Image (cartoon, grey):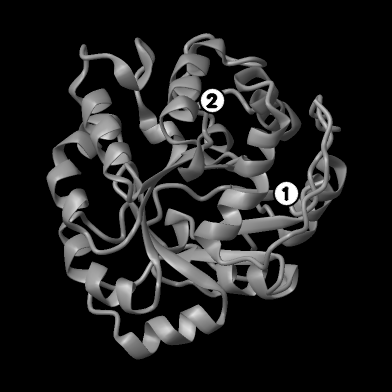
């Protein structure tokens, strides 16, 4: 099925900062909670071409644990100038292993506390000094309440922290609401200046649902107002929760089009799609190109 087209021109170097590759050449963990259908580099390239996206960040899915072969193979096939990886490593990962992964395009370690974690929260602080030595970040997928509980530790880390999927924040009041401790905790992390958030996974916590996911707009707009320089966007393709039947399957083009719902500022969209990913993942700079709303 063809993906919806976003209602704005893509800037050169636009990056999808959150996809997963599931390649049957690489077996899942026998006890993986999710065993999604194949979603290959070739499949994603068709979406890239249709939407005008040029760069991508491949995030290690929980189904592979600490076996990063599929993710790194995808980065190699997309090309080192156009792709980066976020991997999962053992808690005792050596500096040599991290350097080897860095040379293959890795720029962060993911801690998935929302599902099937290969690494628990105790590993975050232990690994962080070694991640700092290679210039990486911690990527965290957790429910908002968990983020709030971990906030004191996250503030101590010597590396940037990237929170997945709108930080899984609840709807009411955006990040300025005092009605939910998680909102205040995330705002505190943003104010400290070392935390990034992915404008991804709108479908995960939406009650209003597709195509517009209207109830996620207040959260997204509040984040855009709070820290536009530390936000990136991603599809979460191939949408693992939807593939598992837990959510309606979203349309990748419509998820990209949400940026036009959340801001009419073409320069800000370029920042989210190009400039911020360059900064976070170390892509080469792309010359500015005007994009229309």
- Could you tell which of marks 2 and 1 lies nearer the N-terminus? 1
Q: Point out residue 98 in the picture as x, y percentages from the top left corner.
A: 39, 81
Of residue 76 and residue 39, the one placed in the foreground of this image is 76
Q: How crowded is mark 1: few (under 14 residues within 10 Å), some or many (20 or more)?
A: many
Q: Seen in the image, is 151 located left or right of residue 247?
A: left
Residue located at (21% from left, 11% from top): 179
Quadrant of residue 292 within the rendered picture:
top right
Helix, strand or loop status at disc 1: loop
Q: Point out residue 106 in the picture as x, y percentages from the top left corner.
A: 50, 71
Q: Residue 102 carries which label?
A: none
Q: Residues within 10 Å of mark 2 (few under 14, many from 20)?
A: many
Q: Are marks 2 and 1 in contact (CB under 8 Å)?
A: no
Quadrant of residue 127 within the rendered picture:
bottom left
Q: In the rendered image, which quarter contains the N terminus?
A: top right
Quick one: which residue is furthest to the bottom in this view? 96
Q: In the rendered image, which quarter contains the C terminus?
A: top right
Report whether residue 19 is seen. no
Task: Note whether 10 is above or below 12 in the view shown.
Answer: above
Residue located at (54% from left, 25% from top): 203
Task: Note whether 195 is above or below 122 in the view shown.
Answer: above
Q: Which mark is residue 203?
A: 2
Of residue 203 and residue 117, the one placed in the foreground of this image is 203
Task: Note whether 244 is above or below 213 in the view shown.
Answer: below
Q: Seen in the image, is 163 located left or right of residue 151?
A: right
Q: Seen in the image, is 52 located left or right of residue 118?
A: right
Residue located at (74% from left, 59% from top): 286
Q: Seen in the image, is 96 located left or right of residue 80?
A: left
Residue located at (31% from left, 54% from top): 117
Of residue 47 and residue 24, the one placed in the foreground of this image is 47
Which mark is nearer the camera, 2 or 1? 1
Which residue is identified by label 1?
A: 14
């Amino acid at each position: 099925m063809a993906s919806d087209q976003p209602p704005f021109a893509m800037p050169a170097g636009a990056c999808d900062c959150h996809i997963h590759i599931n390649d049957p050449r690489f077996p899942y963990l026998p006890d993986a909670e999710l065993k999604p259908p194949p979603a290959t580099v070739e499949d994603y390239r068709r979406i890239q071409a249709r939407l005008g996206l040029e760069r991508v960040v491949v995030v290690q899915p929980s189904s592979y644990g600490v076996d990063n072969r599929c993710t790194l193979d995808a980065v190699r096939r997309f090309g080192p100038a156009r792709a980066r990886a976020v991997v999962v490593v053992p808690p005792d990962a050596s500096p040599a292993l991290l350097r080897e992964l860095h040379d293959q395009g890795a720029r962060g370690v993911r801690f998935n506390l929302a599902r099937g974690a290969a690494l628990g929260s105790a590993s975050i602080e232990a690994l962080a000094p070694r991640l700092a030595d290679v210039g990486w970040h911690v990527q965290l997928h957790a429910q908002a309440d968990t983020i709030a509980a971990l906030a004191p530790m996250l503030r101590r880390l010597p590396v940037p922290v990237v929170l997945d999927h709108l930080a899984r924040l609840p709807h009411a009041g955006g990040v300025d609401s005092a009605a939910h401790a998680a909102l205040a905790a995330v705002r505190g992390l943003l104010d400290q200046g070392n935390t990034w958030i992915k404008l991804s996974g709108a479908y995960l916590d939406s009650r209003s649902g597709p195509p517009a996911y209207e109830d996620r707009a207040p959260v997204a707009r509040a984040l855009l107002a709070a820290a536009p320089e530390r936000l990136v966007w991603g599809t979460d393709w191939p949408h693992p929760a939807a593939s598992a039947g837990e959510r309606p399957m979203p349309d990748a083009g419509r998820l990209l089009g949400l940026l036009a719902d959340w801001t009419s500022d073409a320069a800000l969209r370029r920042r989210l799609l190009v400039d911020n990913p360059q900064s976070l993942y170390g892509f080469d700079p792309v010359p500015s190109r005007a994009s229309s709303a």
